[in-house]
Amino acid sequence: MIEIRKGTLTNGNTAKQLIDLSQVWVEENSTFGLIKNTREDLKEPLFIAVDGDKIIGYTFGHFYTTERKTSYIGIGVKCFDIDEIFVLEQYRNQGIGEKLFRAIESCVKDECVYITLATATKDYEKILRFYTKMVGMTFHNAFLIKSCKDIK
């Protein structure tokens, strides 16, 4: 049975497993520009999905205060940015990502006004459905690019 629990980076084994999972994510080639995490990239609060003693998914992020006004958030608003949320491919479509999101949301919601995130996932339709339909986020903008040169 999969268990969702708060993780801690003081446990060296947790950090190692998270770094290893980030390498799996890189090898999936499912996210533009993703590189393997180092210990310094990992943050708390952190929630992990565990199958026995194996971490099979995680999410972490950080608090920040907005420094400039956008079309949807003013200046000086405390927010929580989800830096990463990942579940091993063989465990996907079982509600684990949603449970990880809900766990971190429950942990931070009293300390911030908004939860934010940016995604570079190649399957943007699926990820937008997850964030808007499954966890109740609102879509606010997109950054699109089109190459005008044949860049190698």
Image: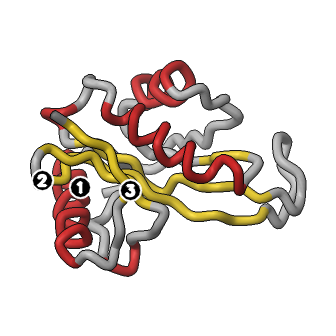
Q: Earlier in the sequence, mark 1 or mark 3?
A: 3
Q: Residue 54 got which mark?
A: 2
Q: Nearer the viewer, residue 9 or 68?
A: 9
Q: Pointer 1: residues within 10 angstroms few (<14), some, or many (20+)? A: some
Q: Is residue 117 left or right of residue 67?
A: left
Residue 88 image point, x, y percent: 19, 42
Q: Secondary structure at mark 3?
A: strand
> Disc 1 and disc 3: Cα gap in Å?
24 Å
Q: Earlier in the sequence, mark 3 or mark 2?
A: 3
Q: Is residue 70 left or right of residue 7?
A: right
Q: Quadrant of residue 121?
A: top left
Query: Do we see residue 82 in this rendering?
Result: yes
Q: Is residue 15 above or below residue 131?
A: below
List the residue tagged with mark 3: 6
Rendered image coloring scheme: secondary structure
Hey, what amino acid is under mark 1?
Val
Q: Is residue 51 left or right of residue 99?
A: left
Q: Earlier in the sequence, mark 1 or mark 2?
A: 1
